[in-house]
Image (cartoon, rainbow, N blue to C red):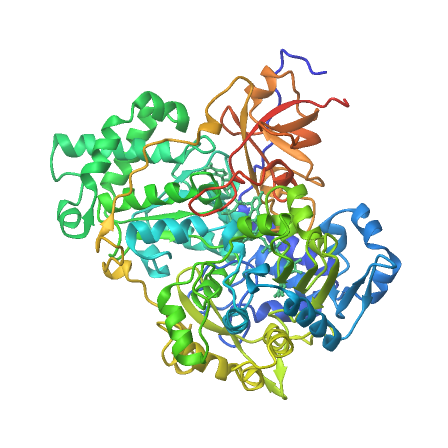
Amino acid sequence: MSNQQDKPEQTAYSGSAGGWPALREVVRHLREQEVLMKGNKTLMRANQPQGFDCPGCAWPDPKHTSSFEFCENGAKAVAAEATAKRASPDLFSQYTVTEMLAAGEDHWLESHGRLTHPMRYDAATDKYLETTWADAFALIAEHLGKLDNPNQAEFYTSGRTSNEAAFLYQLFVREFGTNNFPDCSNMCHEATSVGLPQSIGVGKGTVLLEDFEHCDLIISVGHNPATNHPRMLRTLEEAVNRGARLMVFNPLRERGLERYTDPQNIKQMATIASTVLATQYYQVKIGGDIAALKGMMKCLAEREAAAPGSVFDQDFIAEHTTGIEQLLADLEATSWQDIEQVSGLSRQALEEAAGHYARAKSTIICYGMGLTQHYTGTQNVQQLANLLLLRGNIGRLGAGICPVRGHSNVQGDRTVGIAERPPKELLDRIEQHCGFNPPREHGHTVTEALKAMYEGQSKVFIGMGGNVARAAQDLNFTAQAFRNCDLSVWILTKPNMSTLIHGKSALILPALGRTERDLQNGLLQSITVEDSMSMVHASVGMNEPASEHCRSETWIVGEMAKAVLPNSVINWDELVADNNAIRDLIAKVVPSFDNYNQRLQEPGGFYLGNTARERQWHTPEGKAVFKVCPQLQHELLAPRDGQLTLTTARAHDQYNTTVYSMNDRYRGIKNRRDVVFLNTDDMLARGIASGDRVDVRTVFEGPEDYVLRDLEAVGFDLPSGCAMAYFPEANALVPWSHYDPASFVASYKSIPVTVSLSESS
Ligand SMILES: Nc1nc2c(c(=O)[nH]1)N[C@H]1C(S)=C(S)[C@@H](COP(=O)(O)OP(=O)(O)OC[C@H]3O[C@@H](n4cnc5c(=O)[nH]c(N)nc54)[C@H](O)[C@@H]3O)O[C@H]1N2
Ligand SMILES: Nc1nc2c(c(=O)[nH]1)N[C@H]1C(S)=C(S)[C@@H](COP(=O)(O)OP(=O)(O)OC[C@H]3O[C@@H](n4cnc5c(=O)[nH]c(N)nc54)[C@H](O)[C@@H]3O)O[C@H]1N2
Ligand SMILES: [Mo]
């Protein structure tokens, strides 16, 4: 037991983000994956005009022409794919699936490296056995053919899939007859895709990189670029060096947002200098963003009322927006007491933030998962739009909204048709150009797909990349959902836990990665991707494939389609033989892709455009809309005795469910992930000292007990009432039913919990 008198210590990291430690880590990871020579050459080609798009994040590159645009975590993503290690049939012959499950985590499983052969689950031996592609497709055709209704199958996509493969996939699935496209963005930026169209008529970011050269304020809400988008730090640094402010809203004091040393800046590296990034840092309470944003808007409204025209852009509001009266009435009705209590920020702090915003000529708001993964994720996003609209900060140089996307092509996949609620225009164009009538009925998001599988309504799951059994909420519910399936299929580069939590029949199919050469009929193929700022560019892999049996995702979809739809109206062989042919078809079907192949020749690719950036508002009202959100937070998060709100986030050494190592450098954590970060006053109140073992239990009214036992308590700089644990381990704490009803994104970042000393300690 701890000594109740002493306040527990806080863990912290004193260095800057980037710098020498980042370079050392790159070398260590390359060595660990046994790819030093090959990896170095591979890295030289990342995000280069003739190279491949980095499979890390979706942050754009300056025209794809800079000398060496890669980063520590991009390098790790490349090394993970270019690894010399192999998860061959030997691995699967050594263990039963039950033994592998017991050995227990993705880190161990993925450390075996790249998949080399198609594998089929054999129930008699409880092992995955080598199979052929032909037999695998026959099994898929048999199961899909048996269904009473095409809506009994789920077709998942994780966001690394290229535009070409994603387009073919949606074509196949729609010809098969369903819009069941659960997608990683359903766990990610779906709140953006649902919320922004209602506010500004488009579900994507409105800024381009050049806007960062002209803004004078950047507001960063709920994202951690030093870990998840390291290349973005250079953009932020350049803006700050130019004199722009960086104002951060984040419950955790994230070191990477405070100080940065650019590993590609020789002078900074030599002098161990660093740039102070965040000029203001507001440690908002978890789930307190609506309150903070409404607090800022309330201040602005008060100033505007005192001196009309001094704060709001009245001309813009009059010409381009609707709903200002309702917004002002709602702000008036919201009390300072509630705002302060829910946000955890004082009125004075919010006045200060509002003052900086009111003085800034042009403001960009960047945001990530800290904002979207809440019960109120969609409304959170809409409050950002409100704040920007008040000062006309959408649709002019140096201003706009910047959702920082996750997977490197998650935005592109959606654009080319991976959509469970597809736009009518897309379906009409498929009907017109592809020769079949696509289904019009809406399909399932991840949350809905899991329920359908759990209840036995959906019987087949096919995953194009990803690791849903770990990434989705409610690990037990999700596991049962997969086990209830008649067939589960994973098309992957590496084995992961989802392959072990399988249907009655199961397949693992090995895909080529983006760094690898894709030859079709002897011709080298390029693929294309869309970054966070709607720039589309080509990517060409040049590494030797991990195995002769690894196939491109386009080939896999084409062969699957031929097996499942023998009377298909699509000429799959012609499309699969040449990605240019796929792009020609995309150009006909997907708006804004005219002359796709020609436009790819432009240096850095081409811009898809954004109507809100042009101040054209494709909302039902024909204007940008101030969306009112009367409640400040979900009622489950209201303060109750002893209850804390837990958020989940990524450590520095992981890519989603792929854990590279057990370290989290910028938060001072080494060699472990079984931790929970706590406020030191909250620890003191519970008699918990740093290093004590604690149990974290979800406050949940229902038969299940959602609990993580024996985590190590770590004192950290975060507001009282708040706690943080790592994704994906903490998904065990998120009940299935805890999601935003508008976007279906699970509330991964606001889980009501109690924390107490471990029963076992
Ligand atoms: N190296 C690496 N790169 C990645 C990924 C990866 O795993 N590793 N994942 C990719 C993917 S798919 C995505 S979506 C992105 C994710 O990138 P991020 O959006 O940065 O994701 P998280 O690590 O989940 O971190 C979210 C941040 O939100 C803060 N936060 C938590 N709760 C709240 C809250 O209530 N309010 C506010 N204001 N902030 C909060 C946390 O403290 C944390 O700093 O990165 C992409 N890039
Ligand atoms: N608690 C909590 N849960 C979360 C989140 C959170 O912040 N907190 N974040 C959510 C978010 S933002 C996301 S995007 C999801 C991520 O969910 P997913 O996208 O489903 O998960 P990943 O871990 O990115 O998928 C990793 C697997 O993809 C495969 N893979 C990698 N590259 C390729 C490729 O090029 N082709 C193919 N076919 N396969 C490939 C590898 O085999 C690897 O095992 O998780 C969500 N879950
Ligand atoms: Mo994501």
- Residue 437 point in image, percent of width and height: 44, 74
For residue 133, side relative to residue 162 (left or right) = right
Q: Is residue 230 visible?
A: no
For residue 260, side relative to residue 676 (left or right) = left
Task: Pick the quarter of the image with the N terminus.
Answer: top right
- Residue 105 point in image, percent of width and height: 74, 48
Residue at x 67% of width, y 72% of height: 141
Looking at the image, residue 455 lies above or below residue 87: above
Where is residue 550, by image quadrant?
bottom right
- Residue 98 point in image, percent of width and height: 82, 50
Identify which residue, 733 or 395, lies in the foreground. Answer: 733
Residue farthest along the top direction in this orientation: 5
- Residue 133 point in image, percent of width and height: 73, 75
Total tally of numbered discs in the picture: 0
Residue at x 46% of width, y 65% of height: 412
Identify which residue, 180 or 293, lies in the foreground. Answer: 180
Residue at x 29% of width, y 27% of height: 334
Q: Is residue 637 visible?
A: yes
Looking at the image, residue 693 lies above or below residue 156: above
